[in-house]
Image (tube, rainbow, N blue to C red):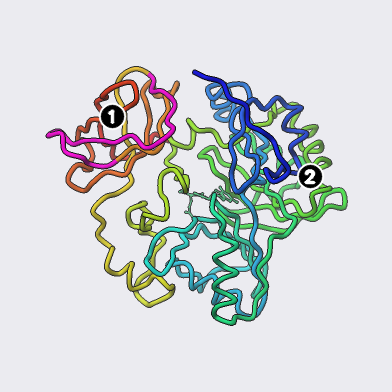
């Protein structure tokens, strides 16, 4: 494999934790929302086993924040998602598919409600700030939409509870899934929630003020010494095995929430969002996201979608994410497969760069 360097630049934003991440031995970065997102420390596999057994600190600052404040904050946000937010509490987080007026996915942020008229969206990789600003201005809404100086730091892994108990106390460990609370440690304010982009459990801390990043990182690292804490990052093997979808990879602005398997977040009983009519017409998609097992040797690195064909050789969709799983000893994958070929158990052929591969549609993800 050819090795490349990523040219750094001022516009390729660092995070409040970048220095710590580099001291901790990051070996690969991805770029996400114009910002550095660590992707490997020791190796994908070593990082994977450690995430499955201990606790990691993840610099996920690249999940940039869009804050929406003001009397029209709620109506503006509801206009962009088919998920019914009417019962959302002030201590709640909600995963929301965001769609345009054609019902196409624009992003899938975690929305954090901070008060009756105050929200923050924690973005996947697209410039959603512009979408909200454009809508607010075009509709003459009474809101301010801006990027606050807030950086998410995730604490993930089976020992996350212990670490969080040591640092934030029992009340924080008692947080239910997708609930948050405001805490203060050593004079620093932050919101902490039980959530995160892994299946190992854990928390996300929304650190307010870049200058507070390194002190908090150090504090958590010291408190986690006996728990074998390490710097980590969203792990490609773990997230594919766990079926966590990645916007820009597994679904894009060409796909609807139904194609992306997000029907449970779509309430179409009453018109809630701009894309309502389009979504009503697209409830039975002609293709859908599926867990797929690609048989044989470990697959090469995927850099663009790999086309798939059905048993007769006809085009049937594509693979968007795949990697060898050292735990399941097979290649785990996510792909968008046409209806006629996507029933669990169906065999398909994947056109990988190293040749044709046999693959099977699975009925569930691995984790
Ligand atoms: N945390 C925060 N911000 C984020 C992410 C995150 N922004 C970018 C990206 N990740 C957004 N995408 C997702 C995708 C899936 C989930 C969260 C964010 C997720 N899904 C759960 C599932 O699929 O089971 C639960 C969804 C639910 O039931 O509400 O957690 O990770 N801050």
Of residues 1 and 53, the one drawn nearer to the viewer in this rendering: 1
Give the quarter of the image for residue 176: bottom right
Left or right of 273 on screen, residue 351: left
| The magenta segment | 298-317
**Is the distance from the Cβ of mark 1 to the nearest ligand 1 atom less than 8 Å?**
no
Question: Which residue is located at x 62 percent, y 26 percent?
Answer: 5
> Is the magenta region chiefly helix, strand or loop?
loop
Crowd tier of the residue under label 1, counting other residues whose Cα lies within 10 Å: few below 14, some 14–19, many 20 or above: some
Which corner quadrant of the image does residue 165 belong to? top right
- Residue 298 image point, x, y percent: 39, 20
Name of the residue lying farthest toward the left: 312
- Towards the viewer: 96 or 319: 319
Quick check: 311 above or below 65? Answer: above
Report whether 226 appears left or right of 101.
right
**Secondary element at image label 1:** strand
Q: Which mark is residue 293?
A: none
In the image, residue 223 above or below residue 99: above
Please state the horizontal and vertical placement of residue 35, each as a whole percent of the image: 65, 44
Q: Residue at x 37, y 37 (%)?
A: 305
In the picture of the structure, the residue carrying the numbered disc 2 is 213
Instruction: First in sequence, mark 2 or 1: give its number.
Output: 2
The residue under label 1 is 351
């Amino acid at each position: 494999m050819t090795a490349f360097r990523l040219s750094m630049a001022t516009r390729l934003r660092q995070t409040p934790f970048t220095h710590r991440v580099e001291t901790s031995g990051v070996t690969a970065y991805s770029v996400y929302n114009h910002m550095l997102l660590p992707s490997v420390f020791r190796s994908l596999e070593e990082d994977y086993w450690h995430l499955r057994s201990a606790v990691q600190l993840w610099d996920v600052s690249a999940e940039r924040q869009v804050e929406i404040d003001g009397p029209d904050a709620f109506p503006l946000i509801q206009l962009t998602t088919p998920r019914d937010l009417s019962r959302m509490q002030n201590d709640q987080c909600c995963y929301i598919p965001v769609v345009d007026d054609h019902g196409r996915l624009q992003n899938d942020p975690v929305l954090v409600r901070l008060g009756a008229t105050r929200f923050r969206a924690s973005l996947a990789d697209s410039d959603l700030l512009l979408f909200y600003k454009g809508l607010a201005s075009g509709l003459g809404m009474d809101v301010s939409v801006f990027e606050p100086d807030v950086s998410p730091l995730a604490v993930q892994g089976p020992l996350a509870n212990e670490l969080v108990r040591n640092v934030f106390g029992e009340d924080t460990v008692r947080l239910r899934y997708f609930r948050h609370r405001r805490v203060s440690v050593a004079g620093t304010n932050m919101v902490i929630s039980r959530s995160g982009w892994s299946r190992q459990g854990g928390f996300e801390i929304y650190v307010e003020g870049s200058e507070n990043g390194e002190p908090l990182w150090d504090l958590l690292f010291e408190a986690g010494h006996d728990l074998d804490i390490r710097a980590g990052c969203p792990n490609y093997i773990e997230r594919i095995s766990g079926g966590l979808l990645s916007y820009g990879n597994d679904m894009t602005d060409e796909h609807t929430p139904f194609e992306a398997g997000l029907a449970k977040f779509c309430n179409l009983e009453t018109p809630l969002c701009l894309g309502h009519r389009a979504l009503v017409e697209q409830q039975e998609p002609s293709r859908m996201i599926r867990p797929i097992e690609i048989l044989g040797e470990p697959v090469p690195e995927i850099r663009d979608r790999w086309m798939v064909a059905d048993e007769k050789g006809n085009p049937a969709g594509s693979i968007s994410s795949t990697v060898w799983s050292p735990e399941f000893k097979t290649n785990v994958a996510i792909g968008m497969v046409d209806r006629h070929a996507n029933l669990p158990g169906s065999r398909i052929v994947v056109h990988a760069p190293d040749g044709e591969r046999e693959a099977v549609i699975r009925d569930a993800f691995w984790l």
